[in-house]
Amino acid sequence: MTTPTTQTKNISRGEMLKHLREQHTETVARTQALLKEQKRVQQEICKVLRDNPKTVPEIAEAVGMPAHEVLWYVASFKKYGLIVENGMCSDYPLYQKAQEK
């Protein structure tokens, strides 16, 4: 008698992933669209920060997004070292693109 675990072992990893993608086509498409949008926003924000440091409201205005969404991106970019703080402008920290190594 064949158990699901035994059947899985007989299928290659590539075939199993292909089968899962076929089963979850809608989820895969939605996830790919979200990732594509995140990458686009990341590129826009980095382009804005390329020349001069800017505050979150300045970045939001430049990319045409609400400040609370830009703040989410800025916080995650800072966490992963893509941008750094560079002083203050009034009550707002200035952010700039991190130096590439």
Image (cartoon, rainbow, N blue to C red):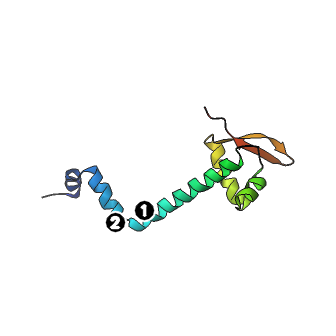
Query: Helix, strand or loop at disc 1?
Result: helix
Residue at numbered disc 2: 23
The x and y percentages for residue 31 are 48, 61
The amino acid at mark 1 is Val
The x and y percentages for residue 61 are 76, 59
Residue 52 relative to residue 29: left or right: right
Residue 29 relative to residue 9: left or right: right
The x and y percentages for residue 64 are 71, 61
Instruction: Name the residue rendered at 72%, 62% in the picture.
Output: 66
**Would you call the spot at circle 1 few (<14 residues within 10 Å), some (14-19), or many (20 or more)?**
some
Q: The C terminus is located in which quarter?
A: top right
Q: Kindly give the residue lying farthest to the right in the view shown.
A: 90
Q: The N terminus is located in which quarter?
A: bottom left
Label number found at residue 69: none
Q: Kindly give the residue lying farthest to the bottom in the view shown.
A: 26
Q: Kindly give the residue lying farthest to the top in the view shown.
A: 101
Comes first in the chain, label 2 or label 1 = 2
Task: Give the camera-side residue of 43 and 2.
Answer: 43
The amino acid at mark 2 is Gln
Query: Helix, strand or loop at disc 2?
Result: helix
Query: Marks 2 and 1, Cα distance to the nearest angstrom?
Result: 9 Å
Residue at numbered disc 1: 28
The x and y percentages for residue 6 are 19, 53
